Image (cartoon, coloured by chain):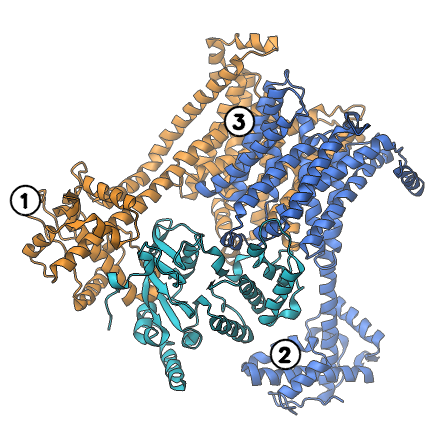
């Protein structure tokens, strides 16, 4: 197989300390990947519709459907299983909606009532029929992906694991659904009221989505188990949501992340326990952990919405503003021919903490805008020019606000304070023009010239 | 000073009262509409005909049931009684002729769609089920964004637009729907002066093209300037008619009560407008 | 009159609900017990390939039923006691989380505890401790449960993801980690993870006295916490911002509530299992909400339903060894929920349907009677209030077609309204036309007057009116002050639209009972009530 050299290459590059059997591990990754892709395609819409927990509810609740189907047909692979799951999955959605609507119960609680009841019912049926049917509740909860390659069917003369065939079909169906109804899904998720007034019933899209969620949940049970279907539904989509503002791109990213977490999950399942001297552990669990890791990375480091990135950006901005404030206040001091201040005094004046003051001064010294004269701070030539620009911006804004917005004189200083940091040369010129190139600001202070 | 509430006389009943399919030229006719939330009726016995091709302001104090009225017209909430006719037929039949601009608070602005995507949603009805949004649709949406003056922001994610720009996006979406009747729920709420001017421009443009727009509006001062026709609503229709006849201090008093300090300003504004005509 | 009757019934329902509630809950318990046992008997009665279970089906005797029901078995006693206290505690805590719209927090939390249990097990194994020591495992579970809650809050507050996604992520990823760790544990020499499986499905039947004691102690601590902090937690659930402004330590209270949820969840894990613990947190509280509008009553109901459900479920599974106790407890609780949702006296489906129907009927009747009155007014011209004119007006009949044209109602809806009015002796039908009876005339005049007063109120007090107008109120006098009504009547007078307060009818049509002046006498319109109703007082 073409993948073999690649895997051998991975084995050489990374001393993972485990053996890779393409016939077994390869299929496990393929099956895990298909399950992940099928789920995450739908998961995007669950996350965007704020219905992630309905995915969780349905995956729990289909248990009685499966159990009854097993009971009736005595087989695991029959389509009856899908029918049973779809019926119960839809019932979950309908009951939840009914309890919420007719009973006036909050959505989360109505889900909780429905899926726990159905799950309990499923458990009772399973235990009652334990002798008749070979179905382990454990298998439903966390699957047995390791065993799936052993159960094969013949496709085109080759032995292919049955789970791979089933999941491939489900993946294709889900992909078609998302592609064909992309527009409708987007509309009904974004603005259900508008969708309804335009004749796209958000109810039908909702139940269509729920049917596919149930089907996907059942198809994934054997391989990854019910809780981990939830991970596949929600986690890659949530991670993608942290990375992009485009729906199409979000779906693509979630699919890519789903595949990565399947591969990574299996590799981790083989390698991590080996470091501690044990044999491999449950792949499905590790796939969820890998997806969680990817989400964590996206949530912290995402370029626009990442928590860490936002934090750093905020810190940098406040540092820049502090630098501006230091330079401007030194300039004003010079204007009034005051003695240059000490760093400590200035920090108190600008309500800056010791550490941020230190960082800002280091930055200013590096840029050569501020120089030390014994323990006093003084502007350099470069710094003076910048201070002049800043003070000019500030006073022009004050003049503009008084002229145009009619703000009271006591409020304009604060507003100008905020605007001055974001005012470039062009905007300053425009301000000057709008305010008829004044020489004094509303407080009667001179507006420095610039040229 | 206080006149009795209008009694329904057979002669001036809304066209919706007649069940003979009349009134195909009446954009919206409401008859005997009562809507109750929980136990309390919110609007009661509301009836009116809107004139075609005019800008109509729906005005009334908070809690007067203005949004409720629009939602009941569009079957978004159940009615306790009443009949609604859109161009002489039920709303369902003539849905495609109605464009709706919801309140800005009603959607999730974090949703991963761009302004262009939102505007293109107005075309979904025309595109139909299962068919993708094509280039010409996107072009159409881009033009609509240009018409509301934010053509250069088409690719921004919607949360990165200012309140006024978001409102213009909604308006552009209604424009591409190319409806004959527009129902707008407070498009002027919390927008800057430039957006307000832009919205008024668009409304006038719609009127010129023979469309009808019914707009829920809060700012009494601008009513005479923006609208031709006004429906004063306070749980029931206090008065309706052309602005010059209906938007009187007397009627406003009946709608808003005695504590309206703006009244004098409004009448002043009206006098100025009338003298300028 | 009809409204008076319904409102009185409502009021009575309100007064009686407390006392009736107790009776009802007792009845419910019995009903549930019977239903469940009947179902189970039926289920076991069907042929099964397993001989032993079949033979056991025939072993049950009256004495065994008695043994279980009277809890003669030490083991049954322990189990029932344990789950009962647990059910009560989770009902109480669940009420708070439900009202705080965090019902599914318990779900995420119980799943998030799995890796903690596994890590505690592994750690104990490494350091040579007792891996199966319950308190030690629970410490691990609590730690990772709390970590899960913290992660949920961070995701919700720091990213643009909403609460549902945060719950889903934590739930599935933590559980995945737990499953992976269990995979390792299974390979350990000492630890066949069999003991840990109990955390997922529950092992009520094998509960030991020590376990029950632990559950009882924890539950009692939580119950005490709920009662001591009742006022503060109530404020937290109702209005977090206000609580903060009042100087309550909101974060500490929130943490306290979450800790109580974690405690209940963790000790409950082994009783009903991980997946089903959430049911105990959600179902009794949600069911209780249907019965009452006051918070302490809701908590009482929730605790009762939780305890009752646990006891009944536990007993059922003790009677029928084939039934897993955790699942049975949940099923009994959901049966309670379903019954509550249907029959709940405050927010139940049926009562709300009835209310809705009554409202619509009331609106229809008001429309009908007002239409009749306006028609009479039109045809008789002037509005003088002498008894003669009144009687003359009453004799005028209005055709169905005319009534139909006056409003948007369908023919069917109109005829229903007329039928009901005829039943209540407000209308009579003669030759296909409607005619008001004496009582009907009085009522129609009252309704029309009230309607006009409201409309006048909307005009005269437009600035405050929308908040006060309650056209459906039985009497305008209950809402507006007498001087306001006087003023409104003066205004109507100016328009020539006054409707005189209907006088007591002395004509042959009257039932002979005195009718007081409307609006001043609460018993005023009792006389025109249909005969089967004996008093019209409004409570």
Report the residue marked by disc 3.
C329
Disc 2 to disc 3: CB gap under 8 Å: no
Q: Secondary structure at mark 1?
A: loop
The x, y position of residue C50, in whole percent, is 61, 10
Q: Which chain is cyan?
A: B
Asked whether the viewer can see residue A398, the reply is yes
Q: Quadrant of residue B85?
A: bottom left
Q: Is residue A375 left or right of residue A84?
A: right
Select label 1 or label 3 by which is in front: 1
- Element type at mark 3: helix
Which residue sits at x=65%, y=76%? A419
Tag on residue A416?
2
Badge 3 local density, few (<14 within 10 Å), some, or many (20+)?
many
Residue pushed farthest right?
Answer: A12
Compute the Cα span from label 2 to label 3. Answer: 65 Å
Does mark 3 fall on the same chain as mark 2? Answer: no
Q: Are marks 1 and 3 on the same chain?
A: yes
Image quadrant holding the N terminus of chain C, namely top left
Would you say residue A278 is visible in this rendering? no
The chain carrying label 1 is C
Dot 1: few (<14), some (14–19), or many (≥20) neighbours within 10 Å?
Answer: few
Q: Residue at x 80, y 30 (%)?
A: A156
- Identify the colour of chain A in the image: blue
Q: In the picture shown, does residue C236 fall above or below C28?
A: below
Q: Earlier in the sequence, mark 1 or mark 3?
A: 3
Q: Which chain is orange?
A: C
| Residue that badge 1 annotates | C508
Percent across and percent down for residue A136 are 67, 23
């Amino acid at each position: 197989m073409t993948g073999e050299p690649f895997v051998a290459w991975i084995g050489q590059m990374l001393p993972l300390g485990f053996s890779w059997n393409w016939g077994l591990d390869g299929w496990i990754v393929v099956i895990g990947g298909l399950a992940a892709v099928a789920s995450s395609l739908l998961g995007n819409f669950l996350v965007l519709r704020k219905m992630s927990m309905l995915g969780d509810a349905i995956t729990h609740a289909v248990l009685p459907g499966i159990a009854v189907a097993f009971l009736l047909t005595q087989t695991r692979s029959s389509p009856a299983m899908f029918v049973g799951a779809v019926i119960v999955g839809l019932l979950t959605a309908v009951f939840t909606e009914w309890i919420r609507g007719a009973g006036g119960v909050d959505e989360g609680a109505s889900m909780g009532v429905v899926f726990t009841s159905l799950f309990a019912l499923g458990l009772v049926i399973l235990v009652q029929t334990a002798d008749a049917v070979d179905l382990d509740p454990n298998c439903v909860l966390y699957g047995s992906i390791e065993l799936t390659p052993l159960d094969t069917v013949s496709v085109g003369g080759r032995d292919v694991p049955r789970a791979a065939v089933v999941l491939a079909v489900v993946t294709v169906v889900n992909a078609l659904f998302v592609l064909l109804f992309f527009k409708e899904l987007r509309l009904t998720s974004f603005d259900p009221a508008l969708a309804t007034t335009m004749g796209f019933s958000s109810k039908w899209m909702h139940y269509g989505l729920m049917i596919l969620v149930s089907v996907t949940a059942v198809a994934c049970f054997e391989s990854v188990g019910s809780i981990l279907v939830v991970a596949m539904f929600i986690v890659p989509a949530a991670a993608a949501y942290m990375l992009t503002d485009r729906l199409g791109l979000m779906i693509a990213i979630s699919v890519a992340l789903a595949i990565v977490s399947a591969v990574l999950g299996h590799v981790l399942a083989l390698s991590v326990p080996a470091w501690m001297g044990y044999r491999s552990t449950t792949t499905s669990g590790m796939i969820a952990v890998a997806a969680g890791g990817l989400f964590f990375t996206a949530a912290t480091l995402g370029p626009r919405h990442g928590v860490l990135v936002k934090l750093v950006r905020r810190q940098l901005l406040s540092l820049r503003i502090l630098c501006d404030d230091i330079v401007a206040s030194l300039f004003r001091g010079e204007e009034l021919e005051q003695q240059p201040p000490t760093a400590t005094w200035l920090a108190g004046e600008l309500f800056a903490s010791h550490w941020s003051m230190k960082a800002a001064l280091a930055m200013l010294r590096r840029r050569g805008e501020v120089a030390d004269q014994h323990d006093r701070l003084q502007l350099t030539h470069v710094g003076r020019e910048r201070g002049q620009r800043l003070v000019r911006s500030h006073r022009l804004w004050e003049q503009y606000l008084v002229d145009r917005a009619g703000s009271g004189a006591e409020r304009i200083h604060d507003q100008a304070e905020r605007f001055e940091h974001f005012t470039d040369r062009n905007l300053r010129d425009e301000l000057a023009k709008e305010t008829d190139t004044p020489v004094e600001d509303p407080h009667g202070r001179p507006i420095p010239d610039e040229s | 000073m206080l006149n009795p509430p209008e009694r329904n006389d057979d002669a001036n009943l809304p066209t919706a009262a007649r069940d003979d399919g009349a009134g195909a030229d009446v954009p919206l006719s409401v008859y005997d509409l009562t809507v109750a939330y929980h136990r309390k009726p919110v609007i009661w016995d509301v009836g009116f005909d809107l004139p075609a091709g005019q800008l109509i302001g729906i005005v009334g104090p908070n809690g007067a049931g203005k949004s409720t009225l629009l939602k009941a017209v569009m079957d978004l909430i159940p009615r306790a009684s009443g009949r609604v006719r859109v161009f002489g037929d039920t709303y369902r039949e003539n849905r495609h002729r109605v464009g709706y601009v919801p309140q800005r608070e009603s959607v999730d602005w974090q949703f991963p769609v761009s302004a262009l995507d939102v505007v293109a949603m107005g075309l979904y009805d025309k595109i139909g089920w299962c068919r993708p949004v094509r280039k010409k649709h996107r072009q159409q949406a881009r033009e609509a964004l240009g018409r509301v003056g934010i053509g250069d922001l088409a690719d921004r994610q919607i949360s990165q637009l200012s309140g006024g720009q978001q409102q213009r996006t909604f308006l552009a979406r209604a424009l591409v729907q190319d409806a004959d009747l527009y129902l707008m729920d407070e498009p002027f709420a919390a927008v800057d002066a430039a957006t307000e001017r832009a919205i008024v421009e668009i409304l006038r443009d719609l009127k010129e093209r023979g469309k009808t727009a019914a707009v829920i509006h809060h700012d009494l001062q601008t009513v005479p300037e923006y609208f031709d026709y006004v429906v004063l609503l306070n749980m029931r229709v206090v008065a309706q008619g052309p602005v010059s006849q209906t938007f009187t201090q007397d009627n406003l008093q009946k709608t808003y009560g005695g504590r309206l300090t703006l009244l004098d300003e409004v009448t002043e504004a009206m006098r100025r407008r009338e003298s300028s005509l | 009159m009809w409204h008076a009757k319904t409102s009185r019934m409502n009021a009575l329902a309100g007064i009686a609900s407390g006392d009736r509630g107790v009776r009802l809950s007792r009845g419910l318990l019995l009903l549930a017990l019977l239903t469940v046992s009947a179902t189970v008997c039926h289920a076991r009665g069907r042929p099964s390939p397993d001989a032993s279970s079949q033979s056991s089906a025939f072993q049950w005797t009256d004495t065994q039923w008695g043994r279980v029901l009277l809890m003669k078995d030490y083991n049954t006693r322990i189990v029932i006691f344990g789950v009962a206290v647990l059910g009560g505690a989770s009902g109480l805590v669940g009420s708070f989380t439900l009202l705080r719209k965090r019902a599914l927090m318990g779900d995420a939390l119980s799943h998030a505890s799995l890796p903690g249990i596994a890590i505690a097990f592994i750690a104990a194994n490494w350091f040579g401790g007792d891996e199966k020591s319950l308190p030690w495992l629970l410490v691990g579970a609590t730690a990772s449960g709390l970590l899960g809650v913290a992660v949920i809050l961070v995701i919700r507050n720091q990213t643009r993801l909403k609460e549902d996604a945060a719950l889903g992520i934590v739930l599935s990823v933590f559980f995945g980690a737990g499953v992976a760790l269990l995979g390792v544990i299974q390979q350990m020499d000492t630890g066949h993870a069999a003991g840990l499986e109990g955390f997922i499905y529950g092992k009520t039947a094998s509960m030991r006295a020590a376990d029950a004691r632990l559950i009882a102690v924890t539950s009692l601590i939580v119950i005490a916490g709920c009662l001591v902090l009742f006022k503060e937690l109530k404020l937290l659930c109702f209005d977090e911002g206000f609580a903060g402004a009042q100087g309550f330590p909101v974060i500490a209270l929130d943490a306290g509530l979450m800790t109580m949820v974690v405690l209940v969840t963790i000790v409950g894990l082994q009783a009903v299992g991980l997946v089903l613990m959430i049911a105990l947190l959600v179902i009794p509280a949600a069911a209780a909400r249907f019965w009452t509008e006051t918070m302490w009553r809701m908590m009482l109901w929730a605790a009762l339903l939780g305890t009752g459900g646990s006891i009944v479920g536990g007993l059922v599974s003790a009677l029928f060894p084939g039934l897993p106790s955790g699942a049975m407890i949940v099923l009994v609780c959901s049966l309670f929920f379903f019954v509550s949702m249907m029959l709940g006296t405050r927010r139940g489906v049926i009562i709300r349907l009835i209310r809705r129907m009554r409202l619509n009927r009331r609106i229809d009747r008001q429309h009908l009677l007002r239409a009749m009155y306006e028609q009479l007014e039109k045809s008789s011209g002037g509005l003088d209030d002498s008894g003669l004119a009144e009687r003359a007006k009453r004799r005028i009949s209005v055709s169905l077609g005319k009534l139909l044209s006056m409003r948007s109602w369908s023919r069917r809806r109109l005829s229903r309204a007329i039928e009901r009015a005829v039943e209540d002796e407000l209308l009579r039908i003669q030759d296909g036309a409607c005619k008001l009876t004496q009582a009907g005339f009085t009522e129609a005049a009252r309704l029309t007057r009230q309607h006009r007063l409201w409309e006048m109120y909307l005009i005269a007090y437009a600035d405050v009116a929308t908040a006060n107008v309650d056209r459906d109120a039985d009497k305008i006098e209950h809402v507006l002050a007498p001087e306001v009504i006087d003023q409104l009547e003066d205004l109507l007078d100016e328009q020539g639209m006054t409707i005189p307060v209907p006088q007591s009818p002395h004509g042959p049509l009257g039932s002979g009972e005195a009718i007081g002046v409307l609006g001043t006498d609460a018993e005023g319109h009792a006389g025109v009530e249909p005969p089967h109703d004996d008093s019209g007082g409004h409570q």
